[in-house]
Amino acid sequence: MRAAPYKSIMISVLLGCHHFSRDKQMNQLDEVINILQSEHHCDEKEARMICDKVQAKLLKECHDPSKMCITDLRIQHWGEAIQEVKGGTANRNLATECYFLWKTTRLQHLTLAEETRRMLSDLRKIVRLLLLTNGDTQTQREKIEACACQPYFDAIVVGGEHKEEKPASSIFRHCCELLGVEPEDCVMVGDSLDTDIQGGLNAGLKATVWINKTVMAPKDTSSVPHYIISSVLDLPQLLQNKGVADLEISQLAGICNVCDSSTEEPRTLACSSSY
C-alpha cells in the first residue's frame, strides 16, 4: 500500500478567546459586572461598558514581556477601562480585583468540547499531534492546564518560550524537529491567515488549511491557503472527501487499519493555537 503523502498537520484554533461561545464569554464577565455593581457603585450600563472596553483592549493587545509582565498589562487594561468610564484617579486595587476575578472565571469556563476531544483522539490514532500557540508563556500554559488538553498531544509548543513566534519559519521548523518530520510532510490548519497560513507557507509546509469561521472572503492581500473549512471539526471530512495533496479515501482507510503496524511510519498532526 502506498504511504500517505503527508506525515503531519498543524492546527491553530483550540485556545483562543474567540473560540468561547457567546454564552461562555458573557458568563466570564457576569461575575465582574456583579462585583462592580454590588461593591463599587457602578450601574449595570457602566459595568458593561467597562467590560466591553477591556475586551476591546484584549483584541488589540501587543505584549512585550521584556517591558511588562502579562499580569501587570492586563491589570492596566482594567484600570484604564474603569477610568475611561468612571473618570477620577486610577484605582489599582479595583483593577486588580476585576482582573483576577475575570481570569479565574475565564479559566473555569475554558474546556475542549467533547466533539473536539473525540476528533483529536481519532486523529491521534493515525498521526502524531502537536499543539502550537503564540502568546505569553504564563497565559498559555494556564489555559493549556485549564482545558486539560495535554493528553491529546505528543508535544506542546508555546511561542512565548521561543525567540520567534508564528509566522516565523523557525518555530515551525522547531515543531517539525520535535516530531521528527520534514516541513514538506506537514500540513498547517489554522484560523489566522497572517500567522498560521502565512507561517505554514513561510516554512514550506506540504499544505495549509484555513478555518474561516466567519465565512467571509479574505482580503486580496491576504495569504492564500490551499484549502478552506468553516470549523476544525470539518478537518476529518476534508481528509476523507478531498484529501490533502490528493490523498485518496482508500488510503486514509488503509492508514487507520495499519496505524499500529511496525512497517508503517508514524504520521504527525501538529496543532497550533493563537492568543
Image (cartoon, rainbow, N blue to C red):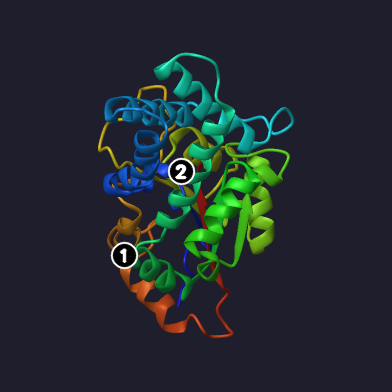
Residue 221, labelled with which disc?
Answer: none
Q: Is residue 65 above or below residue 131?
A: above
In the picture, the quarter occupied by the N terminus is bottom left
Residue 58 place in picture, x, y as percent: 47, 31
Residue at image coords 57%, 83%: 263
- Could you classify mark 2 by the number of other residues whose Cα lies within 10 Å: few (under 14), some (14-19), or many (20 or more)? many
Residue 15 or residue 52, whichever sits in front = 52
Residue at image coords 50%, 41%: 196
Q: Is residue 13 above or below residue 83?
A: below
Local secondary structure at mark 2: helix
Residue 65 in sight here: yes
**Amino acid on which the number 2 mark rests in the picture:** Trp
Q: Is residue 230 above or below residue 258?
A: above
Residue 102 place in picture, x, y as percent: 46, 43
Residue 259 place in picture, x, y as percent: 49, 80
> Total marks drawn?
2
Question: Label 2, on which residue?
Answer: 102
The extreme bottom residue here reads 261
Q: Is residue 123 above or below residue 48?
A: below
The extreme top residue here reads 88
Residue 104 or residue 18, whichever sits in front = 104
Disc 1/disc 2 C-alpha distance (Å) = 41 Å
The image quadrant that residue 171 belongs to is top right
**Amino acid on which the number 1 mark rests in the picture:** Gln
Residue at image coords 42%, 43%: 17
- Could you classify mark 1 by the number of other residues whose Cα lies within 10 Å: few (under 14), some (14-19), or many (20 or more)? some
Residue 12 in sight here: no
Q: Earlier along the polypeptide chain: callout 1 or callout 2?
A: 2
Tell me, yes or no, whether the two marked residues, 1 and 2, touch with CB atoms within 8 Å: no
Question: Label 1, on which residue?
Answer: 240
State left or right for residue 147 relative to residue 115.
right
